[in-house]
Amino acid sequence: MRLIKPTAAVIALLSGLLMSTLAQAHPKLLSSSPAEGAAGAPPEKIELHFSENLVTQFSGAKLLMIEMAGMAHDPMPIKAKVSGSSDPKTMLITPTAPLTAGTYKVEWRAVSSDTHPITGNVTFKVK
């Protein structure tokens, strides 16, 4: 029986396919509620919708107030519960108390099956 030795071109092609598959596995933020830059009533919960199923034990978020009605200040952490949802691609951030008027930022960390963490943030205003 004769064994076929893979050529450099075949190895390069297979490596490229593997890398492109892994690159596509990173979760991307598709949308949020409230949306980036939105202004409105205080939300009871904040929803982040991703392109991939999240590994909840490695994903998370922090809710910060970054500006209080007409007054800038250092970011203030806001107590909130971060959890998964019935949709494995959705992260929920539920403040423990109603949000007051001001500008808020959610700093998130999303991890999917490839275990590579992706970070980002969403900013919105409460009137």
Image (tube, grey):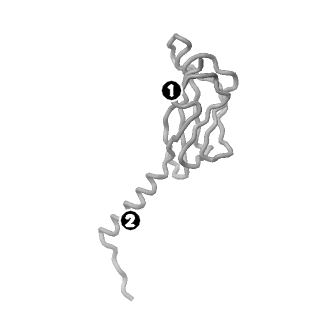
Residue at the spot x=45%, y=55% of the render?
Answer: 22
As measured in the structure, the alpha-carbon distance from the residue carrying label 1 to the one carrying label 2 is: 42 Å
Name the quadrant of the C terminus.
top right
Q: Amino acid at mark 2?
A: Leu
Q: Given contact means CB atoms under 8 Å apart, are the residues at marks 1 and 2 in contact?
A: no
Tell me if residue 73 comes above or below residue 14 in the rendering.
Answer: above
Circle 2: element type:
helix
Residue 13: where, in percent of width, then height? 35, 65
Residue 9: where, in percent of width, then height? 30, 68
What residue occupies the far bottom of the structure in this picture?
A: 1
Residue at the spot x=36%, y=86% of the render?
Answer: 2
From the image, tell me which residue sits under label 1. 37
Q: Is residue 100 left or right of residue 11?
A: right
- Quarter holding residue 77: top right
Name the quadrant of the N terminus.
bottom left
Of circles 1 and 2, which is in front? 1
Q: Is residue 80 left or right of residue 120?
A: right
Residue situated in front as seen by the camera: 94 or 5: 94
What residue occupies the far top of the structure in this picture?
A: 71
Residue at the spot x=52%, y=41% of the render?
Answer: 30
Q: Amino acid at mark 1?
A: Gly
Residue 76: where, in percent of width, then height? 57, 19
Residue density around tag 1, few if under 14, some if 14–19, many if 20 or more, within 10 Å = few
Residue density around tag 2, few if under 14, some if 14–19, many if 20 or more, within 10 Å = few
From the image, tell me which residue sits under label 2. 14
Sequence order check: which comes first, mark 1 or mark 2? 2
Circle 1: element type:
loop
Tag count in the figure? 2
Residue 70: where, in percent of width, then height? 52, 10
